[in-house]
Structures are given as C-alpha cells and as structure tokens.
Amino acid sequence: MKLAILGTGFISRFYAESLVAQRRKDELVMVCGRDKERVKQFATDYNIPHYTTDLKEAVSHPEVELVIIGTANYVHLEAVLACAAAKKHVICTKPLGRNAHEALQMLKAVDAAGITGGYLEDLCYTPKFLKSLAAIKGGSIGEVIWAKSRETHPGPHSDWFWDKEKAGGGAMIDLGCHCIEISRNFIGKDIRPVEVMCWADTRMHPIDAEDNAVALVKYANGAIGQFEVSWSFRGGMDLRDEVMGTEGTIWANNFLRTGFEMFSTGKGVNYVAEKAESSSGWLFPVGDEVHELGYNHMFTDMFDSIEKGTQPAETFYDGYIVNAILDAAYKSAKSKQWESVIIEDWRGSNEVKQPHAFASYDENYYLIKEEILPSGEKKTIVKHKQTGSIEKR
Ligand SMILES: NC(=O)c1ccc[n+]([C@@H]2O[C@H](COP(=O)([O-])OP(=O)(O)OC[C@H]3O[C@@H](n4cnc5c(N)ncnc54)[C@H](O)[C@@H]3O)[C@@H](O)[C@H]2O)c1
C-alpha cells in the first residue's frame, strides 16, 4: 500500500520507524509538514520520494492510497475532510477530535465518502493489551466489573498541547483518550457508556487546561471504567492497566517497570525511553518502544483491514465514542455531578442490565464467601434466599 504521512513531529517519527524499519511491503511515498526544512529532513531520513507543505497536495497526490494523520489535534478535522474529498482511506492518531462534535463530522465524512477511517489507538494494540483482551474474550476472568487505566508523565513536548483551544483540553484529552478506550475494550465495546463523574484540576502549570484528572465512566451493564491521568507525574511515563473480573484479575505494567533495569553514571547515554526524566542512575529502558507501544500490530491491522475491505479493531466510530465520553468528563469536572454521555450515533447494544446471577450454596442459601483461616478452620458465609439472614456455616 502506498502511504502519505501528515505531520513530521514526535508521533510521525514513531509511525515512520514502525513503517520503515521492519521491511514492510507498504511504502511511505509522501510526507507533509508545515516547515519546509523539517519536512525535507523527514523525507531524507525515511527515504520518502515526495514531500510538501501543502496538506491538500499531499492527500490528492495520485500515488497515495492511504493517508496517516499525525498532525496536531487542531488539524485532524481539516485533514480528514481533505481525505474524504479526495476519497483516500485515512487513519488518524488520537484523540480523533477535540470534542465529539468534531469527531462526528469526521465519522460522517468517511462514511459518506465510502472510505475506511481507522483510529490509531496504539495502546489497544500492545502485546500485553492484545493478550489481555483475548483472555477476557475467552472468559478467563469472567464478567468485567471494573477496568482501570492510568497514563501519567511529566507533560508533553510541544507548545500546542498546552493551549486548551488547540488541543481541545489538557491531560484528559491527551491521555484520557487512551485510558478510556483501553477500559472500554475490556468492558465490551458493545456496552453503552452512560455517565461520567470526574475530578480535574490545574495543579502545577500556568495553563487554562487541567494537568491532573481522575474519572469514573459508568457502563449500561453496571461496569466501571476508571482513568487516572497527569501531566505532573515525575519519574517517566507510567502506563498501567488493572482489570477486575468475577473470575479473575489482570495487572499490566506497560512501560515504566517492565522487568528491564539498567544503571548508568550518565556517561554516553542520551535517550532512554519516552518521557524518561533522567539518563543517569537506575534507568528503566524499554526494549523496542515501537513494538511495545503497539505501533506494529496497529499498522498491520489497519492495512490488512483496508486490503480485505473489513473494519480494523479501532475505527473512527471508536474515536467518536471516546470523544463523547471525554465531553461528559469535562462537563462533570465543572458541574461536580454525574453527567450523561451524549451519543448521537450509537451502534452498539441497547440491552438493559441483567441482574447478576448469585452463586447458590444449596437450595435455600446463596454462598457469600468461603475462606480457610490461619488456624486451618474453614469459614463459610451464606445468605438465606427468602429471609435474607446472613449466617455462618
Ligand atoms: N501514542 C500516541 O498515539 C501519540 C503520542 C504522541 C502524540 N500523538 C498525537 O499525534 C498528534 C501530533 O502530536 P506530536 O506529538 O507529533 O506533536 P508535534 O508537535 O511533535 O508534531 C505536530 C506536527 O503537526 C504538524 N502540523 C501542524 N499543523 C499542520 C498543518 N496545518 N499541516 C501539516 N502539518 C501540520 C507540525 O508540522 C508537526 O509536524 C497529536 O494529535 C497527538 O495527540 C499520539
């Protein structure tokens, strides 16, 4: 597949590393950026034959079959509309929109143009995520009751992220989008997110947007998705997921403490890992960041789906739902109340929550808990199905 990449910054270089370094059959043929020197350098670095500073020229170039959007948040809508007008398949980095209104316009545009809109949510393609999701879908941890995802680091690298208008918000839109989609996958994408309760505050930086936030997302089946985000966390980038099911538990540490530790006096070491704050002392490098952050699996799914005419695991629709949840979180942070998730175009299930089936102890009692104590005594606690009395057996 012949590809154009829009943007020459941080994420576009990660994408290019994934696309060029692994001898893929897919080929970057065009790159577009605002700065002429930077775009030329990018083209040279990745051996890309065409480069331009004109977004429409990049998208409509006759060789280009698929466009990868890696531009700042405030350019996503314009870039997607240009792809829809040129009828080129498009895959866009996160967050899809600065809000659900923008995301819905993008979703409608790709639907109307009959092109694929893939959502580049790389953290839903990490090896640990894919294995966790397969285990959950296979029933290994039962029904998911609570799924927590955390992304915290010392703050982003470019000016526009810190500008509320250009980014669409602060740490929550930037990092919460990842966490929301991780939890949503674990809980089940078919299940409607209904309301959000959020705390968000600006604790450390002179900005209008939030630099810290915690939120609960309630789903129609009673499950809770929780996210924790920060732009003031010190010590690197903390990416952790925790899932609690009726039959099991998953904990995944994706980045900061993966079992790879290194000590350096600081001599000779420069880059350690994304958002690492130090290059001396005990360090926590990541073996192959591009792979461990999910980019390889993500692009393979995107290109395979487009070739086969199927939908990738993460689509513009998913990006739109994430934006709708984020909108409710921003509203809740202001109102200090649970706020409804407003979804104009819901494509999942409308089933009402079924009461959980309690485990029976016998004909008359439910089983609440069984435990063996240090003394060796086995305790069994039951509840009478009719009277409700709680008893020890
Ligand atoms: N894990 C991830 O998925 C991940 C990580 C980082 C950033 N991102 C996302 O990637 C996007 C870019 O972030 P970044 O970190 O690369 O930022 P960056 O500041 O490093 O790069 C932004 C790029 O956008 C380009 N750009 C801005 N306006 C443009 C225009 N009108 N036409 C063409 N190019 C234009 C700039 O030239 C620059 O190359 C953001 O949406 C961000 O949220 C995703």
Image (tube, grey):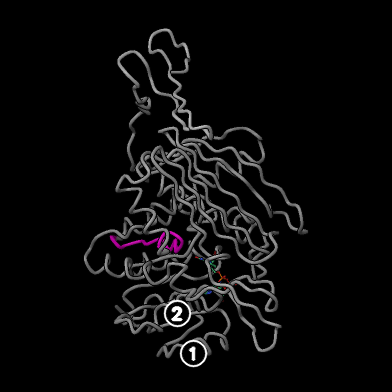
Residue 197 visible (yes or no): yes
Disc 2 on helix, strand or loop? helix
> Is the residue 43 above or below the residue 370 in the image?
below
Disc 1 on helix, strand or loop? helix
Q: Looking at the picture, how far across and down is residue 127, in whole percent?
A: 40, 64
Seen from the viewer's position, the closer of residues 165 and 254 is: 254
Q: For disc 1, does the CB lie below 8 Å from ligand 1? A: no
Q: Residue at x 56, y 48 (%)?
A: 227
As for residue 332 lying within the magenta part, the answer is no
Q: Looking at the picture, how far across and down is residue 211, in whole percent?
A: 69, 55
Total of numbered circles in the picture? 2
Residue that sits furthest to the top in the current view? 387
Q: Earlier in the sequence, mark 2 or mark 1?
A: 2
Range of residues picked out in magenta: 114-125
* Residue 313 quadrant: bottom left
Residue 227: give its label: none
Q: Which residue is mark 2?
A: 16
Q: Is residue 227 left or right of residue 210?
A: left
Q: Are marks 2 and 1 in contact (CB under 8 Å)?
A: yes
Give the crowd class for mark 1: few <14, some 14-19, many >=20 residues within 10 Å.
few
